[in-house]
Image (cartoon, grey):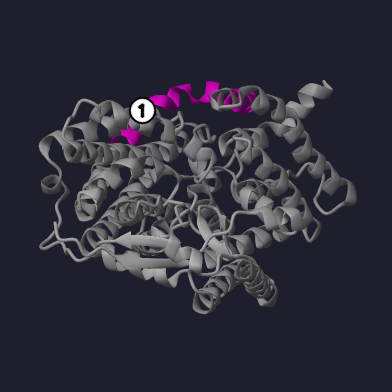
Amino acid sequence: MEKSSNSKLEEKEQNNIEVWEDLVSIKDLVLALFICSFTTLAGYFIAPNEPPKPLFFGLIGALIGFGICSYFIKPKRTIQHDEREE
Amino acid sequence: MDAVLIIQMIMAAVLAAVIYSIIGIAPGTDETAVLAPVTLVLVLTGMEPVVILSFFISGIVAKKLADSVPVAVAGIPGGVMSTPMVEHALVLKKHGLPDISIQKMASGSVIGTLIAVPVSLVLANALIPFSDMIKDYANPLFFFGAVFLALMTKNKILALVSIIPFALLIQGLRHLYWGVGVVPEGTNVFISFFLGITIGPVILTLFELLNKEKRTALQRYGKKNITFNNKKRFKGIPNPFKILTKKEIGTTSLASLIGSFTFIMSPVGITIFLGELFSSRIKDPVKKASRAISSMDGLTNAAYISGTLIPLIALGIPLSPMAIGPANALFNAPPVFTLEHNMHHILSSADFVVATLIGSIVALVITYFIIVKFSGQICAFIFTKIPHEAMLGLFFGLVLLLAFMDAGWINIGGVLLIGLVAGVLHRWGINYGVQFMVLYSAPWIIAKIVG
């Protein structure tokens, strides 16, 4: 799983770290944490103050943050197709 | 139960099946971390308990079905519970059979679900007469649960010694909040501490990134290289009873039955033990691997369902690793649910049966068919479109929100502190089970120490 040290990869930049079993870039991670925290809390605070609306808005905010991050941040994975016919 | 409620349950189940199929496929998603925050938010919104239960059951079934996909196509576990299957799935992948591997695992899951649902309902009803006796001893039971789980870890003494300091940290913060008046005295902050423990490992890593020496010393990687084979497509309508051989159906059923009875044990441990036991005498590597993954997948699914349903129906207190982890919100999510007033007390037997059936059938129908037919395409989409950063951001945002709701801004610091300590404990091998048991028994432990 963690054999990312083959020669092909070493030529590229190595600036990703492992958090929770997958790779992230520190810069993108910080960005994602800020974006999601902001959208979630913003959703919570702009919601009408009658429960459970703040929670629903917060949840929607979190999902919007997730969407924004998925759009702007590229996953740190490369896919190779195995063409063997067996 | 009226038609409107049933429609709501079906809609909730469909939503859960879609969300958790995606999350299940994304690599490295811990079951507790992905199931607990969302369920908690739903419970706190005051949604009907039956609707939440069908959402949750559909979520676990879909998550279990989906997390076999990255195991099969890329040898990457989709969650903690699928880790034991990687070794066997890699054997099939090496023989160019990742599609067979997915079909066997997903079919194993179906059998696990079909067995676990009735068995759990029957077992739970058989346990009800003993529940009053068990409930009276809930607090000491959580403490002994912590001790028992600590003795199961690698560093037993380390785990045992950590119990009291960790209980002190939890109660210390609660007393502080009462002292400064952010929380009324006697109200135990629970949800956000629970989530702090859950994302502890991530919080610890984030703190370490702020330490220059640690940051430069961290191992750096390029991109994660994932090789997979997705040209084959399943033709026709998949049928688990045809995909699995008779022997595989037999061992999967037996493993699922045992998994339902051992709901109080660690599901990962049982999975490794039984999976090896049932496949060790088979010589042919491909047959051996198929037998192992189908029975392991059936078992994990059964352990999930029984670990949630049995304590929920029979006891009303979360006395299983599954109940105290991912399913926690169904037992304790103050102010909506408490140990004295939760789904156990609110729902009737018929409610449990209907919600479980709707949840599991919806998830099986949607996720099983989609996964068997389109696993390669879905996997490629998620691997190339969904960054891990976004997943971490999503859960961090939810934790922040729930921390703020529990006790205001000060609690964000409190949750970071809990996460920091929990992350260190986790890294030392003191698993979530021990920490959650301490969270539950902290008031009792401190009361006993003070005398």
Q: Which corner quadrant of the image does residue B20 belong to?
A: bottom left
- Quick check: B392 above or below B352? below
The x and y percentages for residue B100 are 19, 51
Image quadrant occupied by the N terminus of chain B:
bottom left
Please give the name of the residue rendered at 25% of the width and 42% of the height, measured from the top-left corner. B114
Provide the residue designation for mark 1: B273
User: Local crowd at mark 1 within 10 Å, few (<14), some, or many (≥20)?
Assistant: few
Q: Is residue B16 visible?
A: no
Which chain is home to disc 1? B
Left of B26 or right of it: where is B408?
right
Image quadrant occupied by the C terminus of chain B:
top right
In magenta stretch: residue B145: yes
Q: Amino acid at mark 1?
A: Phe
Say what secondary structure mark 1 lies in. helix
Most frequent secondary structure within the magenta stretch? helix
The x and y percentages for residue B377 are 28, 68
Q: Which corner quadrant of the image does residue A81 belong to?
A: bottom left
Please give the name of the residue rendered at 54% of the width and 34% of the height, measured from the top-left corner. B317
Left of A59 or right of it: where is B358?
left
Q: Is residue A70 visible?
A: yes
In magenta stretch: residue B279: no
* Of the pair B204 and A53, the residue shown nearer to us: B204
The x and y percentages for residue B129 are 44, 23
Q: Count numbered badges in the picture.
A: 1
* Of the pair A51 and B103, the residue shown nearer to us: B103
- Quick check: B321 above or below B180? above
**What span is in magenta?**
B118-147
Q: Which corner quadrant of the image does residue A41 belong to?
A: bottom right
The x and y percentages for residue B77 are 40, 50
Please give the name of the residue rendered at 44% of the width and 61% of the height, measured from the top-left corner. A7
